[in-house]
Amino acid sequence: MIFKDNYFANKQFLVSGASSGIGAHIALVLNSLGAKIIAIGTDEKKLNLKKENVKNQNNFITIVKDISQIDALDKWMIELAKKYGSFDGAVLSAGIQQTAPISSVLSVESAIRLFNINYFGNLQLLKGLIDRRAKSNHGASFVWISSNSSIKAQKGLTNYAASKASINIAVKSIALEIAPKYRVNAISPGFVMTEMIEKWSSIYDKQYIKNISNKYPLGIGSVEDISPLACFLLSQDSSWITGQNIVIDGGGSL
């Protein structure tokens, strides 16, 4: 569907990973549709730049937080709800990538940090949001960003794929626990051009991008391809959808 201006008026959403990439774009789109956004990220400069470009600056609150520090994140989330008011949902987009073959896979410590951000940190935020003390509104919808790496084998992504696969099965169990009051779903994007890809330019060079593009029937994606699905899952138009992992990858996993 096509969302009209102010479709999400009087709604409040939390977005983790809002400094850049998919999370940032979803936060900007939701704001443009009238929602109040609590944007969480690790890069204060990038968060402030995003705020400068939003349609409704008064409805875009930025908070610097490293969710790899998972202790008491759920309690912190409850305090945010008390401070800013009840939420109508969230987009759990915070994540990092780790590329290394199993023969030289990085240290256990680095793997734990990856899981803390991609899985446990976001899980703790969600735990806080569904706590009765947070008073999230009835019908609230939560969208967790996974990856098509969780369903399609790719070299060098052992830990990353495992962290994303954890999301896919978790949303099924959580959906059963929180229904019918709340909903939760996952989105698994394919290869999307983001700042994170540019940061890893030593790996994702021009030839790599060309090779990947040839494997995608509809070409590689952009953040603009993902936001409409996130908005749909947050909206009441998807009120009968929960516990699902929806792949959006231009046919890359076929």
Image (spheres, rainbow, N blue to C red):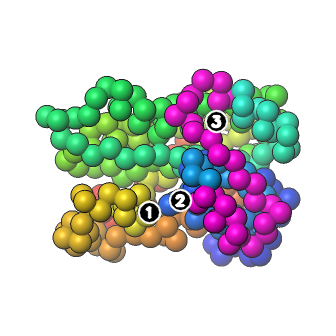
Q: Which of disc 1 and disc 3 is earlier in sequence?
A: 3
Disc 1 residue type (three-letter): Glu
Secondary structure found at label 1? helix
Disc 2 residue type (three-letter): Ser
Residue 67, magenta (yes or no): yes
Tell whether 64 sits left or right of 20.
right
Q: Which of disc 2 and disc 1 is earlier in sequence?
A: 2
Q: Which residue is mark 2?
A: 20
Residue at 67% over, 61% down: 48
Residue range in magenta is 45-74
Q: Are marks 1 and 2 in contact (CB under 8 Å)?
A: yes
Toward the viewer: 121 or 182? 121
Residue at 85% over, 40% down: 83
Tell whether 240 sits left or right of 211.
right
Q: Which tag is nearer the camera, tag 3 or tag 2? A: 2
Disc 3 residue type (three-letter): Leu
Picture layout, residue 129 above or below residue 38? above
Residue 195, numbered label: 1
Total numbered badges shown on the rendered structure: 3
Give the percent coordinates (x, y) of residue 244: 51, 46
Q: Residues within 10 Å of mark 2 (few under 14, many from 20)?
A: many
Picture layout, residue 122 above or below residue 229? above
Q: Residues within 10 Å of mark 3 (few under 14, many from 20)?
A: many
Q: Which residue is mark 3?
A: 126
Secondary structure found at label 2? loop
Identify the image quadrant of residue 49: bottom right
Toward the viewer: 204 or 199? 199
Identify the image quadrant of residue 233: bottom right
Tell whether 89 sits left or right of 103.
right
Tell whether 95 sits left or right of 124.
left
Give the percent coordinates (x, y) of residue 76: 72, 31
